[in-house]
Amino acid sequence: MCFLRRVIIILILMTFLSIMESPSLRAQNVEDYYQVDYASVEFSKTEIHGAEIFYASKSVSITCIRNVPINISQGRFTYRVIAEHKVSGNITILNPSYTIDITPFPTMAGDIYEINEAVPLQFDQVSESGDYDIVLELTRAELRVFSSWYDITGDIPEEQRTQFIGMVGYAPWTVITENVSNITPSSAMLNGSLDSVSDYNRVDVSFQWGASTGVYTNETTPQEITSIGPFNTEINGLSSNTTYYFRAKATGSITQYGDELSFTTLASDTVMYDLPLSPGWNLVSLPLIPNSIDIDDILTGIMPSLDTVWAHDDLTKEWSNYNPLAIINSLNEMKDGVGYWVRVTSSCTLTIEGEQPTFPYEITLYPGWNLVGLPLMSESKPIEEMLTDIMPSLDTVWAHDNLTKEWSNYNPLAIINSLTEMDDGIGYWLRVKNPCTLTIVGP
């Protein structure tokens, strides 16, 4: 029985210490029975924020090189993982218990057992920020011999039950760089957010920014944050039509950074126009001359909600369309003065960046149906005023309410019409008898 217990102890020490990656501490005589090949512990992340889960991965290969003269059928090893703060020494439990089950246990020469473990770890959000040593602790060790389980945890020297496996940094907050807003030719609003902030933590947040990726020559004045939520800072004195790069920064006892994002300031004569879209079909137009007529550039802000876009050639009466999932599309550009059918799956806002059209603004109309849009105007205007110069050729006008999905129309011969005004950003169906030109005199 003494021999049996000695072999059991040797085996448990071998397995435990090999997993712990401590070749200098291997139990005596283990090499007579086993060859152990192992890799260093790898962490999925070494900078941990808030309550996020990260993993410690370890690969071990155990090869039996000599028959073991005992019928060991199974091994069970239970561990916990702790983090010890390098300055204060405070202990945080990252994983209170996980078990490695080795079945069947390798006892015949040539037997190989592979251990590939990815252990989930998580900090308690009241943990203090800073650098931590990560330690693996064996809490229970058992071997099954001749159908009986032997708990030999107590036979393993206490100093051999723990092993340093690496180091990570922790911050009880997560700082996120958000998309910029309120872009002008010379200014922009930088946005960020902070979550997973422990109640007792004070965090100073700011933004780093510059004109080259990864090079931050400027930093905004830090703001003190004591709770989760958004934060922002406006920066001024920017050059027009220039790309800038920025990231959010949060500093407590350690410093964390958000991802880098970029934005381009508007050209000096650029105007922005927000066009709200509702789920389903929307009949719209571009009231500005867009900075880029490429349809991907124009629609980039609504791509998550976009289903399809259709355009009508008023001369040929043919249709073209754009599908964001298609490889080839017949519609590749969007221009001012044209109406478009845009179908989206959820409410969103299409932001148009471009120049104010000059006046008088002319739209060529062809016999039959024409799908058109008006330039940016100061206010909506009576339909008779807008269409005065084409009245001799005008048959009818139809407009679609993108929110209610109802139609309204205008007939120059009717006494009462449901469509009485025209405005920018809307697509209109105009049917005329003869070729003519609609001239918009001014905004």
Image (spheres, helix red, strand yellow):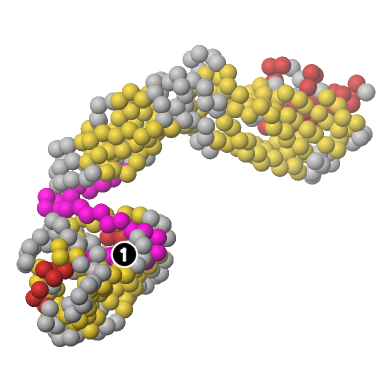
Which residue appears at 73% of the width and 35% of the height?
Answer: 100
Whether residue 39 can be seen here: no
Q: The magenta stretch spans which residues?
A: 261-286
Q: Quadrant of the C terminus?
A: bottom left
| Quarter of the image where one finds residue 354 | bottom left
What type is the residue that disc 1 sits on? Asp
Q: Residue at x 62, y 39 (%)?
A: 118
User: Which quadrant: the N terminus?
Assistant: top right
Residue 165, percent from left and from top: 59, 27
- Badge 1 density bin: few <14, some 14–19, many ≥20, Cα 10 Å: some
The local secondary structure at tag 1 comes to loop
Instruction: Report the front residue among 65 and 272.
Output: 272
Q: Residue at x 69, y 32 (%)?
A: 98
- Per the image, is 259 magenta? no
In the picture provided, is 141 more to the left or to the right than 398?
Answer: right
Left or right for 76, reference 192: right
